[in-house]
Image: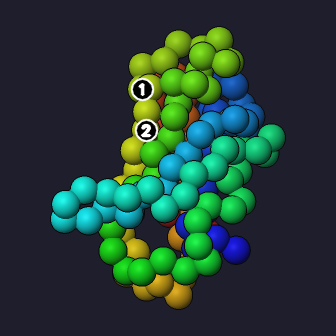
């Protein structure tokens, strides 16, 4: 299983957000590097996103919400959502869900 996973729920439509492009980046002092990329499935999940283990450090999930909102015919105020987080214990799994609507989003550390 990937060390970092995510899922996206469209709270305005009341269903999973399928087809959202997601990038996992490692953030360094000089920029960032893409570790993996994937697309949410029909359940809104990216089940395989990067390696089974990541080093301690700063990471970012970047969600292409513009493409999703265009496909679903919804307005788009946030064309991209970037969620930064820190991995302190590389032995743990890090699940970072995104709750999405055209004019708001929220996130949390899931299980």
- Image quarter of residue 36: bottom right
Residue located 64% across and 71% down the image: 2
| Residue 110 appearing in the image | no
Farthest residue, direction right: 42
Image quadrant containing the N terminus: bottom right
Q: What number is the disc on residue 78?
A: 1
Q: Is residue 34 above or below residue 91?
A: above
- Residue 14 rendering spot, x and y as whole percentages: 71, 31
Q: Quadrant of residue 103?
A: top left
- Asked if marks 2 and 1 touch (Cβ < 8 Å), the reply is yes
Labelled disc at residue 81? 2
Q: Whole-percent x and y of residue 83?
A: 40, 50
Q: Position of residue 25 (x, y in %)?
A: 42, 57
Q: Quadrant of residue 95?
A: bottom right
* Foreground pick, 78 / 33: 33
**Residue at image coords 63%, 37%:** 20
Other-residue count near label 2 (Cα within 10 Å), few / some / many at <14 / 14–19 / ≥20: some
Q: Residue sitting at 70 percent across and 51 percent down?
A: 45
Residue drawn at 46 percent across, 52 percent down: 61
């Amino acid at each position: 299983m990937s060390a970092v996973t995510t899922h996206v729920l469209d709270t305005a439509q009341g269903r999973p957000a399928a087809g959202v492009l997601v990038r996992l980046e490692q953030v360094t002092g000089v920029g960032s590097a893409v570790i993996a990329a994937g697309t949410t499935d029909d359940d809104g999940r990216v089940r395989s996103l990067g390696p089974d283990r990541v080093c301690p450090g700063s990471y970012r999930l970047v969600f292409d919400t513009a493409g999703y909102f265009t496909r679903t015919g919804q307005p788009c105020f946030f064309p991209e959502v970037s969620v930064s987080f820190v991995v302190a214990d590389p032995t743990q799994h890090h699940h970072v869900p995104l709750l999405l609507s055209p004019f708001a989003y929220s996130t949390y550390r899931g299980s």
